Amino acid sequence: MFDDEDFIEELCHCIKAKDVIKIKVLLDEMDNVSPKVAQRLLFEICRTEDELSIPLLLDIQTHHPNIAHAIPTLSDVLYGKMHTLVEFEPLFNNLKSVEEKCCFVEALAETEKSSEINNFLIKLMREESEVEIICSTLRTMEELKSSDFTEVVTDYLYSVDYKLVLQAVETLGRCVSSTGIKALESRAGSDMTIDRKIVNSLAKAGTNEAIEVLVNFLASNRVHLRNYSRVALVHLKERSIEALVKALGHGNKDFTIIALNTLGETGVPEAVKPIRRFLQNFPEDANVRFSAYESLGILPVKAGAYTLTDGLSDEVEAVRMAAAKAVDHLYDKMFEMGIKNILDQNENPGQIVEAFIIAECDTVFKSLIDFDLFNKWVFAYFKENRSPELLKRYAPKDKSGELTKILNSLEAKDSSGEFQVCVVDDSRLLLRIYRKMLDQIGVVYHLFEFAEAALEFMHETKPSLLITDLNMPGMDGIELTRQVRGIYKPADLPIAMVTTQDESSDGASAKAAGIQYYMNKPFTEEMLKALIYESKGK
């Protein structure tokens, strides 16, 4: 073992002689490096020409972590040396190990961009066969962000090596080009992990073309791809509005619905006017109208908010509820006078009041409970529909005490042994419609806004029937069904999926996952009752 002075002397001799093998033997003997030796080592290496110094610095970086740790400036020195290189290929070819070659390629990302570097990397991608080196090259291209790389990187989207496919996706997302974006769009739809990477890469690219591709994915027949894109577009906020609004003119109802939902979830004021203009044309499909009002109910609507009251007279209950919740979200004195006038003039004021009740419009209820016409229809509703949950909600707001009397008259029920329905839907409004209908039908129910929570519940409790929506952020209905089928066989737990008629493209995936029944939106109490009775016979 050398002491410090002996080591430095021997090192200088070997460097002067360009004896690389002996230098590496000396490095292998260095278990603990003193700061003095480390700095002298770096100094002596830096004095030599690049053809010797760069390989030695790479060797220390990759094979001698204890020495590298003792030289905090090692990386900076290496990058500085790389910056002055004119030719890259000869030096790269002389490196002995894969690790050193990877380190060399990745160090190029820290140098000044140049056509010489780009050309070297492109040639390397076409000639190299070692997976780790190709992966490092892709990472360097990702950092350099040149559109020159698009063609050669696109080839790796279809590599037989999964890791290279994923890295190629990320690289194309950073090397923004029209060709690269189209390549990512074409690659989507075969694998959930790859699709998630593609969506994230397009979102990072953030160009108008990339955002339009994300919006197009909302019409995909792959549920996971729709959901990934929806989340990405929501995070893009104002930047996604223009492309989403274009989608509202599409003939596909499901595409329109998910575009409306996404617009609402962005939470930005820029989404309000396009949705209002869309509603002025009175879309024929009730599911579309429901989604439009539901989105307005979570957006910061200001001017023109009173137009939301048009939905209170819709022929479909779900649409009336969505409009009612939107009104409650924006309720003020102007709305109070307007709704009183609507109730006075409408042929079916009871339907409007019922919509406010079921949608849990607390602000409207508190404001209007002393208004005679509103009060009359509130009591009429609760005499016919004695929902314990709704009575508990509204009784404290009724100064007359009549709702409290109705609540106190209800007898507690033992739900053990009864038919129990588990419902999963990310729309709170639809869950309230389920609650109203299931109360009327007279079965025990468990409502979940998140599929993950429902799955946790079903690990502990087996319901008699599971009803799930198809399109949900996070875990969708098909994935929920797959996981539930890992717990309960079809004979033990019937599962029904609620869809719109245009979602037939998901039928094969749903059936393969274990779905046995279907119910179309908008559904009625009679349809829900028929589904329950049919499942009982299973």
Image (tube, helix red, strand yellow):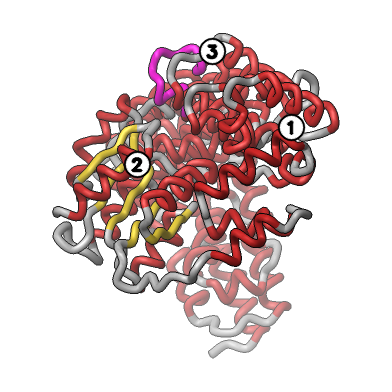
**Marker disc for residue 525:** none
What residue is at 63 percent from the left and 72 percent from the top? 69
For residue 139, side relative to residue 359 (left or right): left
The answer to whether residue 53 is left or right of residue 495 is: right
Residue occupied by mark 1: 300
Instruction: Identify the disc placed on residue 282.
Output: 3
Q: Is residue 54 visible?
A: yes
377 or 270: which is nearer to us?
A: 377
Q: Position of residue 188 (x, y in %)?
A: 35, 32
User: In the picture provided, is 307 more to the left or to the right than 216?
Assistant: right
Nearer to us in this view, 416 or 498: 416
**Which amino acid does the dot numbered 2 rest on?**
Val
| Secondary structure type for disc 3 | loop
Write the residue at 59% across / 74% down.
67
User: Looking at the image, which is closer to me, 310 or 158?
Assistant: 310
Residue 136 visible, this angle? no
255 inside magenta stretch: yes
Between label 3 and label 2, give the one nearer the viewer.
3
